[in-house]
Amino acid sequence: MKIIHIMVGGPESEIPDISNHESKTWVGVDRGAVRLTDRGITPTIAMGDFDSLSSSELEHLKTITEVIQFPAEKDETDTEIGLKWALDQEPDLIRIFGATGGRLDHLFANIMMLMQQKFKDAISKIELIDRYNYVKMYAPGKYTVSRIPDKKYVAFTTMADVTGLTLKGFKYPLSNATYPFGAALSSNEFLADQGTFSFDTGLILFIQSND
């Protein structure tokens, strides 16, 4: 499986242990590139406007990896630029770290990014991960999901009007339910190591989390 990892510039306190996330390709987005070098990882490529880096930090990056710098005033966020590059490499899976926590505008931008038309066909490949949360967007279909050992809670948030929602293998099951956009079905739990869910229309943001 070809996996690409993206580190963006979210708060240091929200970044999980990445030592177990093996990948030959790491993308450093803005300060995320420094986050990687601080952990002994040389990014395959670094990109962004780098407005959060000092001139010495940016110059050091240029000595160890390929750096693509964009103007601060642009139509796409740094995370979108990194994600587009990753998708061009045709991976099986993309994991994004440092995209949650801290500034709420950054959090919403990164969540709403998954709903953009240009990324819609690729959402099945994209995961957002921080110290407390695992986040993935799902299009209509039937899915089997596995419980992450250190995550207690499960949430299903409707990012569009959802019909036919069925949950099996969870503490609070559902059968053919309908919810409007914005319904947050939170604080659910797995009954065992796996559960299944399905729905006919809409979009669902699936979250596993711990306190």
Image: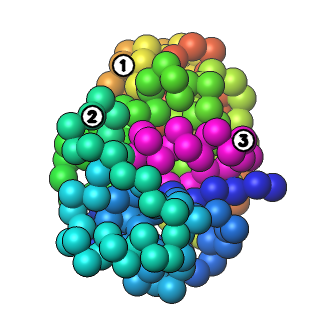
Residue at x 67% of width, y 72% of height: 22
> Is 24 located above or below residue 120 in the figure?
below
Residue at x 62% of width, y 25% of height: 121
Start and end of the magenta stretch? Answer: 79-97
> Is 150 located above or below residue 168 in the figure?
below
Mark number, residue 181: 1
From mark 2 to mark 1, how far is it between C-alphas?
Answer: 30 Å
Tell me which label, 1 or 3, sits earlier in the chain: 3
Tell me which label, 2 or 3, sits earlier in the chain: 2
Query: Which residue position holds label 2?
Result: 74
Assess disc 3: are there few (<14), some (14-19) or many (≥20) residues with their C-alpha within 10 Å of its C-alpha: few
From mark 1 to mark 3, how far is it between C-alphas?
Answer: 31 Å
Query: Which residue position holds label 3?
Result: 90
Mark 1 residue element: loop
Indicate how the structure is coloured in the image.
rainbow
Residue at x 27% of width, y 34% of height: 74
Q: Give yes or no for residue 190 being in the magenta stretch.
A: no
Callout 3, which amino acid? Answer: Glu
Residue 168 image position (x, y, % from top left): 66, 38
Assess disc 2: are there few (<14), some (14-19) or many (≥20) residues with their C-alpha within 10 Å of its C-alpha: few
